[in-house]
């Protein structure tokens, strides 16, 4: 794929996920903001489009088997992949981070008051993500599996497209929330007086954000786009 100024960020990362770290390095949002063109993203960040375009094409010139594997995966299997890889990661990691953030607030809060806001933001993300995952697992993914396997809208809500829009809005909210956490933590930089728990907590928070970005990318730029196209096709034919 030849990348141009008009190529959308999400499409570029969809073709080759190896571009994601490059975009993150330049603070270009590839998951929630994947719908804008490379030209617009560079303009918003005051980046040299020629240089960025050259680097992106160099990355894309090398095949990414993982991205190809995801792209060719049937939608019902992609739902399962997301659940096993990303939903399970959230369920496993949230309790650890909540406990560690509480400990940091208790021990280091006096010298680092930003920890209280970080914990408040993460607790809000934890609650919202828990509800979001439940909705995906009980409503969204079962509907996608049924449409994929049965090629039918029987039992599928007529406003399924609106449900997907709610999911997209949730993603944007969490993307914004973690952007604030990153900013408050100095891009997850452990302060000089920070202990080993401080360092590990920030490292895990950063890993959590990266996993969330990948998670949102798979849904926003691949799963939901394909599912919406299938929904519209089945609706037209029925």
Image (cartoon, rainbow, N blue to C red):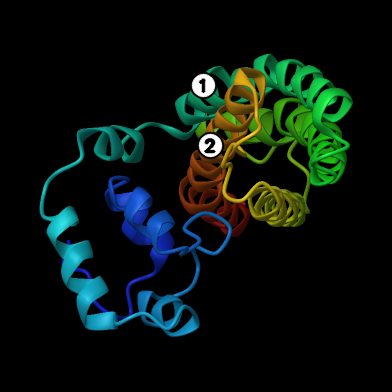
**Disc 2, SS:** loop
Residue 79: x, y in percent?
Answer: 54, 29
Horizontal side of residue 210 vs 146, given as left or right: left
Placement of 159 over or under 78, stated as above or below? below
Residue 196: x, y in percent?
Answer: 60, 19
Please name whichever residue, 12 or 20, is drawn nearer the observer in this view of the structure: 20
Horizontal side of residue 35 vs 133, given as left or right: left
Residue 7: x, y in percent?
Answer: 32, 72
Residue 189: x, y in percent?
Answer: 56, 42
Placement of 188 over or under 233, stated as above or below? above
When asked about the image quadrant of residue 216, the answer is top right
Please tell me the numbered disc located at residue 151: 2
Q: Earlier in the sequence, mark 1 or mark 2?
A: 1
Horizontal side of residue 112 vs 31, given as left or right: right
When asked about the image quadrant of residue 46, the answer is bottom left
Q: Residues within 10 Å of mark 1 (few under 14, many from 20)?
A: few
Q: Residues within 10 Å of mark 2 (few under 14, many from 20)?
A: some
**Disc 1, SS:** helix
Rendered residue at 66%/46% (across/down): 185
Q: Which residue is mark 1?
A: 85
Horizontal side of residue 172 vs 226, given as left or right: right
Q: Nearer the viewer, mark 1 or mark 2?
A: 1
Q: Quadrant of the N terminus?
A: bottom left
Rendered residue at 75%/54% (across/down): 173
């Amino acid at each position: 794929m030849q990348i141009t100024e008009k190529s959308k960020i999400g499409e570029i990362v969809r073709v080759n996920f190896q571009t994601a770290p490059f975009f993150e390095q330049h603070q270009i949002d590839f998951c929630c903001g994947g719908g804008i063109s490379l030209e617009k993203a560079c303009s918003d960040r005051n980046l040299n489009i020629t240089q960025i375009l050259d680097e992106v094409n160099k990355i894309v010139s090398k095949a990414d088997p993982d991205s190809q594997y995801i792209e060719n995966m049937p939608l019902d299997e992609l739902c399962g992949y997301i659940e096993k890889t990303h939903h399970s990661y959230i369920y496993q990691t949230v309790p650890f981070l909540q406990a560690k953030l509480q400990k940091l607030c208790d021990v280091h809060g006096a010298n680092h008051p930003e920890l209280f806001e970080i914990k408040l933001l993460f607790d809000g993300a934890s609650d919202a993500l828990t509800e979001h995952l439940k909705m995906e697992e009980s409503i969204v993914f079962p509907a996608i599996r049924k449409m994929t396997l049965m090629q039918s809208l029987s039992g599928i809500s007529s406003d399924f497209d609106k449900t997907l829009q709610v999911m997209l809005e949730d993603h944007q909210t969490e993307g914004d929330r973690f952007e604030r956490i990153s900013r408050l933590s100095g891009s997850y930089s452990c302060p000089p007086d920070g202990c080993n728990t401080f360092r590990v907590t920030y490292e895990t928070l950063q890993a959590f954000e990266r996993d969330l970005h990948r998670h949102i990318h798979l849904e926003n730029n691949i799963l939901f786009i394909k599912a919406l196209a299938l929904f519209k096709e089945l609706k037209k034919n029925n």
